[in-house]
Image (cartoon, rainbow, N blue to C red):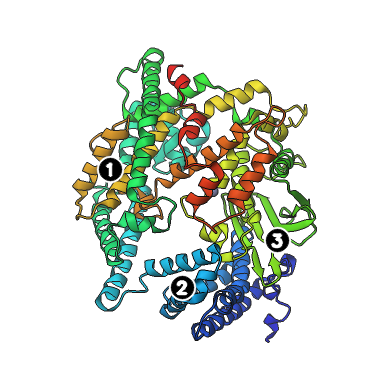
Amino acid sequence: MTEQLTNNPLLNPVEELVAYEQIQADHIVPAVEFLLKDAKAIIEQAITLESPTWDNFVEMTEYGTSRLWRAWNVVNHLNSVKNTDEVRSAYNTLLPQISEFSTWIGLNKDLFNQYKKLHDSAEFQGLNKTRQRIITETLKDFKLSGVELEGAAKERYAEISEQMAMSSQQFALNTLDATDNWSYTTEDESEVEGIPEQALAAANALADGKGWTFNLKMPSYLPVMQYAKSQTLRERMYRAYATIASEQGDSQYDNSQNIETILKLRTEVAQLLGFKDFATMQLEKRMADSPNQVIDFIRDLAARAKPFAEKDIAELKAFASTELDMNDLQPWDLAYVSEILRENKYAYSDEEVKQYLPEDQVMTGCFNIIEQLFNVKFEATESETWHPDAKVFALKEGNNVIGYLYTDLHARSGKQSGAWVANERTRHLHGQKLITPVVYLTCNFTPPQNGKASLLRLDDVITLFHEMGHALHALLSKVDDPSASPFSSVEWDAIELPSQFMENFCYEWPVIQKLSRHQESSESLPRELFDKIVAAKNFQTGMQTVRQLEFSLFDMLLHQQTSVLSIDDVLKQLDNVRQEVAVVIPPSWHRFPHNFSHIFAGGYSAGYYSYKWAEVLSADAYSYFEENATEDLGTLNPASGEHFKNEILAVGGSIPAAEFFQNFRGRTADATALLRHYGMTEEGLEA
Ligand SMILES: [Zn+2]
């Protein structure tokens, strides 16, 4: 071994916790390159096995490559939370090698054949359901990657993949450039009336101190739409935003052609792989069974939500007319009038709420709630971390440590923004040896200032609970085979179930009392303020719901079609969808599809429905806790927690999501709880 490979903490056994303080940037490349070579040799060896079995093939490659993936997870994490020039350069050196390795595995026909052999062997019938599922799902992944194609079909597949990637990339570039290249400057003070000070200062800086410059990026666009009194300014901005990357805007960035190409190629690739249409192919690995099931789901929810959306818009119109003397509401007036109405109905400030939510109280409260619900214990440990802010907790069930949670909560330079959860290592029973899961929970809350505890916004608390749900999914999993772990195998449209489920607790009165303590008076959040927060949460949920359903239905219907669509067909499709579900019909020059990056340049094609789908699942799961609430515990009933833990968290991806949901709820998911949580009830309609 060379010098860089001895005493290299990234090469320590997976079973040990990582010695973060010992990791130097120059450990990274040699360690990962060494482990890559090692992993490749293990797989090459596995390919030559005459008769692959679970133990000599699947388990052997799984365990043999686990050191690589753990090291790469650590590097990935450091690149996100402790980014230095050295770490970034090491990461950038390795990224192409890691992608190449993953592609080599994903398109490896010999590896595919080994899985097929195992699938067809006598051993297969004797394997437990989890292992059978791992094998069949792996075969599906291989098929979806085109590994079975031969000759001309194989060539065409490669061609399409490349063209699709190029068109999506061009779609994204067009929206980006069209957004970047539009701005509007005014020196007329009357035109900027009403816009908050902070936004005006930013606009003034953009104009080099001479007037105000506005653009189509959210921090500039939103304050104008919400607060600018000038209808002319709002209309100007609205029109520019609504026509981004279309022939109605700056036509050099027109995405029409890209949309047509992407849709045509998607249909072709799906049919090449043996599917009826692209939507059906996308659903192959999802909880939803078929495009029609999703379409029925959307239509059912839309029909139930539409009366509430109509009520929202009627309220808005009445308010505009009586209070603001605006009798003919235009699309560019909606956000503006909504903001005034919202302030009118539920005046409270984020600042006021924050005073009750010091981070230490929230964290302690959150841990207590989890401990009570799931009969576990978090214990701070002294293990090394990458930063003084980061902490490690051992999660104990009885006397057994079942996993480790790293938290890193504060924003700082060199740390990527946002909040997320990632695995460092996955639970794995290797022979008699149990490797416990290790999970990172990262947030970007405001750091403590002047020795005072950091105060969280309510949104921060909800984010924390959301991410904690993801963390619990990994930590409370009882799945022994890593390939069926929650993050590697729960269907994409069900993965947000535990996280969105946890958010619900933040709107429970007993929970908020545990989480809150005024930083001076030490009192918990007053009931009156809590009631306002809950009411504000449900403001215009009808309108928001039908809007998301409009996008979802459009996306699904578009990807279910097999005929070649022109851009006019696409716009017509959207029109029809709006007639069916929307309560706000935009002007005819509106070009929403041209900027719909989620489905044309992101991972949400035939998948936009998943936002609502997962919400229905999580709300319905939470309603089990509501039904089983007790007088003294409320929804924090350990019996409910135990049931959720056993039927949903513990099973990870060992069985299909539809099955674990059925096991938990005793029936399929129902949207009633979601509508109720949004205040969309009979009473809500009459009120
Ligand atoms: Zn999430």
Q: Indicate left or right for 516 with 211 as reference.
A: right
- Disc on res. 119: 2
Of residue 461 and residue 47, the one placed in the foreground of this image is 47
- Does any atom of ligand 1 lie closer than 8 Å to the CB of label 3? no
Alpha-carbon distance for marks 3 and 2?
A: 43 Å
Above or below 374: residue 284: below
Badge 1 is on which residue? 591
Badge 3 is on which residue? 386
Q: Is any part of residue 618 visible from this angle?
A: yes
Tell me the quadrant of the picture where the N terminus can be found. Answer: bottom right
State the image quarter where residue 454 is shown: top right
- Considering only order in the chain, which callout, 1 or 3, is on the residue closer to the N terminus? 3
- At mark 3, the secondary structure is loop
Above or below 148: residue 505: above
- Considering only order in the chain, which callout, 2 or 1, is on the residue closer to the N terminus? 2
Q: Indicate left or right for 171 with 127 as reference.
A: left
- Considering only order in the chain, which callout, 2 or 3, is on the residue closer to the N terminus? 2
Q: Which residue type does callout 2 highlight?
A: His
